[in-house]
């Protein structure tokens, strides 16, 4: 073994004993290639804001007519998005094992004390099982709003394509995106996004400014991104979007530095 390899192995072992893993980084070209696939498109519909002005509000294509149900895993202490939908006569199925009930009670809310995941267990259920519990055989379009602290990747990878295709619009908060520079995690994330992009366009991206971003050369990756997906079946044609932030975008955390979408994500 060469001396440099022994030195690197020693450093890795020391880092590992302290609770850290050292890995080679994903090539920048691979990260940039995935970012380019995720660039937002104008899908022919104006965007509207559903929910509060701060955290809990999201931008969606103005195409909610005919949607009667929303699935919304990850509730915690905020249900502003679902409350707004209730005012539009859209019922919401909510799920979160970390709480015993939603922060507000509404007749339009149906709550399950469960986490969303890749398997059915005592505390987890899959998106398919959840859908079938309440809407088995239902063929109408659905809405999905998901903020589940990193479990979103395994949920999408494990969900059948026909279940995903039933959602007209999906608004997802993706976590730990700085790990795109870890080759193993990059493969997992790429698989997740490429599966979604087979059936959906990216209609909007908004960085959550609570956690900042990481930079490498001309690549900047926010750690948390709220991404709005729009089913391709609803879109006749697309054009590139070149102006960010959107006038309706708002910082999630007013006490943190603003974090506009980095230019590498749209130019």
Image (spheres, grey):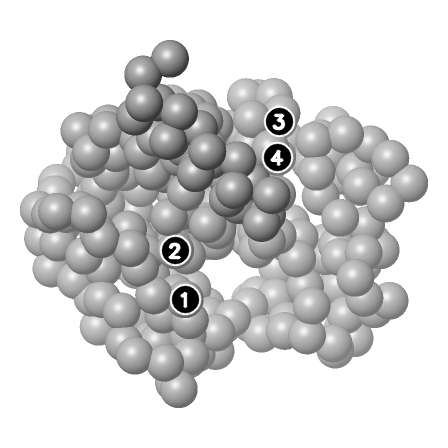
Q: Which of marks 3 and 4 is in front?
A: 4
Q: Nearer the viewer, mark 4 or mark 2?
A: 2
The residue lying toward the viewer, choosing from 250 and 144, is 250
Q: Are marks 4 and 2 in contact (CB under 8 Å)?
A: no
3D distance between C-alphas at marks 3 and 4:
6 Å
Q: Are marks 3 and 4 in contact (CB under 8 Å)?
A: yes
Label 2, on which residue?
Answer: 223
The quadrant the N terminus occupies is top left
Q: Do the residues labelled 2 and 1 touch (CB within 8 Å)?
A: yes
Q: Which of marks 1 and 3 is nearer the N terminus?
A: 3
What kind of element bears circle 1? loop
Viewed as shown, does residue 73 lie left or right of 166?
A: right
Label 1, on which residue?
Answer: 211
Q: Which of marks 4 and 1 is in front?
A: 1
From where the camera sits, is residue 167 visible?
A: no
User: Which residue lies most toward the right here?
Assistant: 122
What kind of element bears circle 2? loop
Viewed as shown, does residue 172 lie left or right of 181?
A: right
For the point 12% across and 47% down, the residue is 217
For the point 75% across and 57% down, the residue is 96
Badge 2: residue crowd in 10 Å (few <14, some 14–19, many ≥20): many
For the point 87% across and 35% down, the residue is 121
Q: Nearer the viewer, mark 2 or mark 3?
A: 2
Label 3, on which residue?
Answer: 159
Badge 1: residue crowd in 10 Å (few <14, some 14–19, many ≥20): some
3D distance between C-alphas at marks 2 and 1:
6 Å
From where the camera sits, is residue 220 visible?
A: yes
3D distance between C-alphas at marks 2 and 3:
24 Å
């Amino acid at each position: 073994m060469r001396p440099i390899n022994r030195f690197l192995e020693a450093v890795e072992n020391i880092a590992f004993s302290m609770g850290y893993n050292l890995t080679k980084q994903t090539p920048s070209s691979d990260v940039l290639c995935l970012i380019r696939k995720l660039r937002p498109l104008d899908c022919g519909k104006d965007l509207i804001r559903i929910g509060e002005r701060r955290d809990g509000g999201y931008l969606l294509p103005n195409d909610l007519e005919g949607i009667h149900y929303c699935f919304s895993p990850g509730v915690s202490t905020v249900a502003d998005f679902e409350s707004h939908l209730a005012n539009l006569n859209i019922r919401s199925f909510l799920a979160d094992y970390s709480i015993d009930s939603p922060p507000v009670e509404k007749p339009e809310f149906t709550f399950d004390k469960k986490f969303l995941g890749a398997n059915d267990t005592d505390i987890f259920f899959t998106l398919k099982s959840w859908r079938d519990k309440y809407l088995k055989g239902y063929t109408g379009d659905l809405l999905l709003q998901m903020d589940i602290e990193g479990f979103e990747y395994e949920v999408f990878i494990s969900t059948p394509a026909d279940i995903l295709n039933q959602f007209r619009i999906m608004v997802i908060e993706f976590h730990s995106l700085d790990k795109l520079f870890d080759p193993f995690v990059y493969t997992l994330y790429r698989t997740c996004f490429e599966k979604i992009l087979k059936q959906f366009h990216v209609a909007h991206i908004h960085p959550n400014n609570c956690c900042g971003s990481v930079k490498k050369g001309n690549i900047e990756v926010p750690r948390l991104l709220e991404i709005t997906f729009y089913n391709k079946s609803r879109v006749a044609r697309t054009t590139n979007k070149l102006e960010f932030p959107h006038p309706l975008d708002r910082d999630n955390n007013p006490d943190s530095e603003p974090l506009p979408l980095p230019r590498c994500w749209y130019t």
